[in-house]
Image (tube, rainbow, N blue to C red):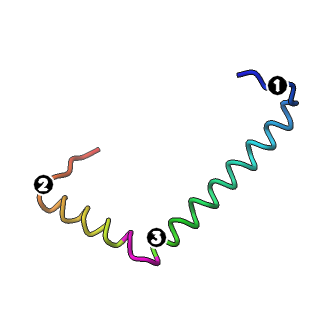
Amino acid sequence: MKNRGFKAELLAKFSDWSEAFDAARFDEKIERDAKAGALERLAQQALADHAQGRTRKL
């Protein structure tokens, strides 16, 4: 991919910043979902699926 004249160091710094920003947003969403009970519902569904034999070993 052509970098349009940006220095590799600047692109690397931006990439690092962008990755950290996205990770922080992901963590915030997981925290909100956990507080809202969304993860509990998913866990209960996964356990029910497993109990009914709808899972397989990875």
What residue is at 87 percent from the left and 25 percent from the top?
5
Q: Residue at x 86, y 38 (%)?
A: 10
Asked whether the beta carbons under mark 2 and mark 1 sit within 8 Å of each other, the answer is: no
The answer to whether the residues at label 3 and label 1 have Cβ atoms under 8 Å apart is: no
Q: Which residue corresponds to the image point at 74% horizontal and 46% vertical from the top-left? A: 16
Q: Pointer 3: what residue?
A: 33
Residue 13 appears at what percent x and percent y? 81, 43
Q: Secondary structure at mark 3?
A: helix
Which of these two is toward me, 51 or 38?
38
Q: Is residue 37 magenta?
A: yes
Farthest residue in the top direction? 2
**Above or below for 50 versus 9:** below
Asked which secondary structure carries label 2, the reply is loop
Mark 2 nearby-residue class (10 Å; few <14, some 14–19, many ≥20)? few
Sequence-wise first label, 2 or 1: 1
**Quarter of the figure that contains the N terminus:** top right
Q: Amino acid at mark 3?
A: Asp
Q: What predominant SS class does the magenta segment belong to?
A: helix
Quarter of the image with the C terminus is top left
Asked if 58 appears above or below 31 in the picture, the reply is above
- Residue 30 part of the magenta-drawn span: no
Which residue was labeled with disc 1? Answer: 4
Q: Which residues are magenta?
A: 35-39
What residue did someone put label 2 on? 53
User: How much space separates mark 2 and mark 3, taking CA atoms?
Assistant: 27 Å
Tell me if mark 1 has few (under 14), some (14-19) or many (20+) residues whose alpha carbon lies within 10 angstroms of its own: few
